[in-house]
Amino acid sequence: MSGSSTVAVHADRDVHPSRAVAPPIYQTAAFWAEDADQFARAAVDRRGKDFYTRYGNPNHAQVAAVIAELEHTEAAMVTASGMAALTTAVLALVSAGDHVIGQRSTYGGTASVLLNLLPRLGVSTTQVDQTDPAAFEKALTPQTRLLLVESPSNPLLQVTDLRAVSELARAHGVLTMADNTFATPLNQRPADLGIDLVWHSATKYLNGHSDVSAGVIAGPEALLGRIWDVALLTGATLGPFDAWLLLRGLRTLPLRMSRHNANGQALAGALNDHPAVARVHYPGLATHPQRALAHSQMSGCGGVLAVELTGGFAAADAFLGRLRYARRSASLGGVESLAVHPAAMWRGMLSDEQIAASGVAQGLVRLAAGTEDTADLVADVLAAADAVASWKELTR
Ligand SMILES: *Cc1c(COP(=O)(O)O)cnc(C)c1O
């Protein structure tokens, strides 16, 4: 089997319908047929690529071919965003009366699906502490159909034991679906650890240039067929040009991830002992409580880390204000460093009690290291942390 960098460049060869070195953009809503027979065949071709773009498009098929090979799954499909991937899959896999288990530390949109959307549709949900594999077992009921995991989690970088969770689920005939956005298939392949379905916000690392909203789902053909049937109805179709941009981003994913991994590790190490910092959450640190588990299922820890400033909300805000490179933004995974202060972002949505219940401290900053030079990023975060430390001295 070829290496990941080769796969990212060549895995879509068989779905290239032209001789152009760079694939054309099939910016079309529909395709025409030669005759009635061909038309009838195209209409029932699941995830086919030349009937109607909501059903499929060559640009979709090219992305899917690369994702499936990178994730070591039988197949893959694309959606208009990460959230479209999640909601389409969940709508396909569960029905009223079923039960879904998710994590307590999880992406905000996923938490909202568990807390609001699914209960409204008659699907009960439980969120568990994912650092404890036994918590998943305790939450199982005879109605449980799906386990939704995310590792490392956003924004606390908590690690889920993917082998333990998939073994448990298999033993009980329950499906598993893992959000692999933070790790990417370069650092972790959930399917190799027994997870049934892998999904991504391709808006983040997979595209990597902060210029596309997209999602992907990878897994066995049979499950993807069920999800695709629902995708036709939800209609969260990725535009052909966005699929083309995503494919272009994927070509350099392996190159970019090695720099993101190095930068994340360097920033975490540099800030870990700083007097302005109470704690750094990053699974690549020797001090991370789940270091051994992370090491057993990941080959790199990515560019995202969470830094808890000792001075609380004001210190986090001052730290972000002093950063030269990482600007305040809710996204991550692009070539440019970005940073977010969750307690500030959530001020208009959640009470202080709700923020505390999510485990996120008022002084927590999520840093997403881009692909800039490591030394520049390290110097920048240390200067900002020094400024916050001396500012605290002055205001004491
Ligand atoms: C951003 C993100 C999502 C949502 O993806 P969108 O593309 O914004 O819909 C899901 N999971 C994680 C971990 C994310 O960071």
Image: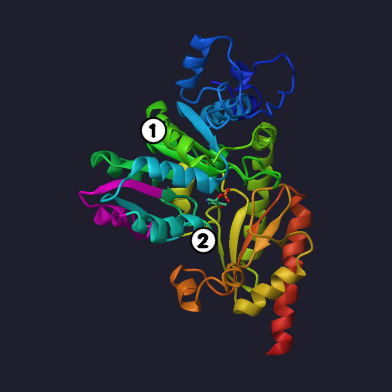
Q: Determine whether the beta carbon of the residue marked 2 sits less than 8 angstroms from the nearest atom of ligand 1.
A: no
Viewer-nearest residue: 165 or 107: 107
Decide if residue 247 is on the left or right side of residue 88. right
Q: Is any atom of residue 50 visible in this view?
A: yes
Residue 156: numbered disc: 2
Determine which residue is flagged by label 1.
Answer: 226
Check the image and report above or below for 55 versus 113.
Answer: above
Give residue 67's quadrant in the image. Answer: top right
Badge 2 amino acid: Leu
Badge 1 amino acid: Arg
| Location of residue 232 in the rendering, given as x and y in whole percent from the top left corner | 48, 35
Viewer-nearest residue: 180 or 259: 180
Classify 10 Å Cα crowding around label 1: few (below 14), some (14-19), many (20 and above).
some
Give residue 243's quadrant in the image. Answer: top right
User: Mark 2 or 1 closer to N-term?
Assistant: 2
Give residue 22's quadrant in the image. Answer: top right
Q: Secondary structure at mark 1?
A: helix
Q: Determine whether the beta carbon of the residue marked 1 sits less than 8 angstroms from the nearest atom of ligand 1.
A: no
Decide if residue 142 is on the left or right side of residue 56. left
